[in-house]
Amino acid sequence: MNIIQIAWKYIQQNKANSILGILLATFGTAILCILMLTAEQLENQLENNSRGIDLVVGAKGSPTQLILSSVFHMDNPTGNISYDEAIKLRSNPFVKNAIPLSLGDNFKGHRIVGTEKEFIDLYELRLKEGKIWENDFEAVIGYEVAQTKGLKVGDKFYGAHGLSEDGHHHGDHPYIVTGILESSGRVPDRLILTNLESVWEVHGLHDHDHEHDHDHEHDHASHEEHSHDHDHDHDHASHEGHNHEHENQEEEVVLLDEKPREDVFVKSIATGFESQGLEITAVLIEYSNPAAIGVLPRTINQNTGMQAASPALESARLFSLLGIGIDSLEILAYVIMFMAAFSVFISLYNAFKSRKYDLAVMRTLGASKFKLFTMVISEGILITFLGAIFGLLLGHIAIYLIGQNAGNAGSLISAMAISPNEWYLLIVGLIIGFVASIIPAIKAYNTPISQTLSGN
């Protein structure tokens, strides 16, 4: 019988103390595993999902909430902004790309996002099958949506109002799946993408605009003959109604509208919508040059009714807040691991007193002092190593359960992900077992044969 087998037999004989040591090591390792995986994956996901997005513009409110709702799709939006005002950002020389988002509906917990096809390029997404939407109420679904909900190209589904799957269903406006995206490991995997006009029509903005058109037939007749003149007259009339203070504010905002983009308004009219009065949730901005970092956010925040928030800054702030809680839990985990080591020490030390006679007999049968030393060390290492193994398993199970009950936030962490640092937890378990059994092992090494056998 080798040393490991003997150590295992001793563990089985001293079940109560051994189980206590294993449990303490298990819980300590599990907490460290959860914290390690959560911190690493959250940091990677925050960086990965905000890549390529330099700025998010939305309604006034919490900048963190704006980022969470429009970039990570984990929170409710701060409100709506004017489509006209937001889309003017495209004419700013500091803006390379501005992609509008319109939120408000979901399908079984997966958000329906009204946007433009440039969203696909921004996230570097690829189609697994099908094609990008071409008409209203055509949708491209993320890989996770297709896998979890069983949707295929050509299937129809109905959105529910709001961002909860318990909302009122829009039974009059079915969407049809035209494409399925490949897995990207990013937020779009769990989104449903369609055009802006579909979201507007679902919420009655299309009908509202037509009623407005009926009440102003003369204005629209003039618009059909002189579309450009009509827009100019409308802006001029609006400016006449502003007071002197507002005129000064308009002079400050001139930076936001230096290069007119008529194609945006032509597009909205051609699709049957008047842009006047339409609203969106947010705009994802990509800078044209580094100088925009110090100019564009301040200009938007000070001179418009909108809010600009940086995903990089807000993600760093969010992670720093999470870090406080993570550090506190890490301290708790190390305290538990220390208790596990102390428990193993007490268990082995007490066991040594009852095993002195057995150890002396083993010495008379030819066992060396070193063999007795390694036997006790092996017993301590086995206890904490088993605890570390069980702790890693428990940690991954806990992350899985957290992901199942945390909604959209849970999708940021995966129980299947394995961190290279998990090996360190196993090493820590071995070290704790070794240190805890050093003193009992030395006692075993120095066991006096004659005195022990004689009962003295």
Image (spheres, helix red, strand yellow):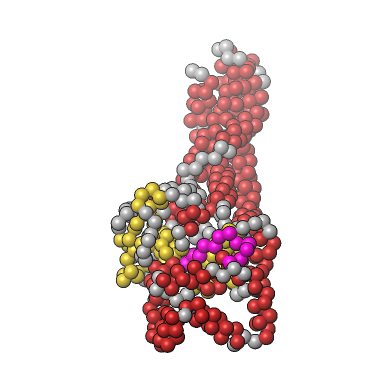
Between 95 and 312, which is closer to the camera in this rendering?
95
Which residue is at 53% across, 83% downward?
Answer: 233
x and y percentages locating residue 14 in the rendered image: 52, 32
Which residue is at 54% across, 33% downward?
Answer: 385
Please say whether residue 450 is one of the residues in the magenta stretch. Answer: no
x and y percentages locating residue 96 in the rendered image: 58, 59
Q: Is residue 166 above or below residue 327?
A: below
Magenta extent: 91-104
Please say whether residue 95 is one of the residues in the magenta stretch. Answer: yes
x and y percentages locating residue 354 in the rendered image: 57, 28
Q: Is residue 382 above or below residue 223?
A: above
Between 97 and 441, which is closer to the camera in this rendering?
97
Give the mark count. 0
Which residue is at 67% across, 56% downward?
Answer: 290
Res. 134 in view: yes
Res. 149 in view: no
Q: Quadrant of residue 94?
A: bottom right
Which residue is at 67% across, 20% downward?
Answer: 446
Instruction: Farthest residue to the front: give it.
Output: 225
Q: Tell me: 151 left or right of 411.
A: left
Between 288 and 150, which is closer to the camera in this rendering?
288
Say which quadrant the C terminus sits in: top right
Q: Tell me: 9 left or right of 32.
A: left
x and y percentages locating residue 339 in the rendered image: 61, 42
Would you say the magenta stretch is mainly helix, strand or loop?
Answer: strand
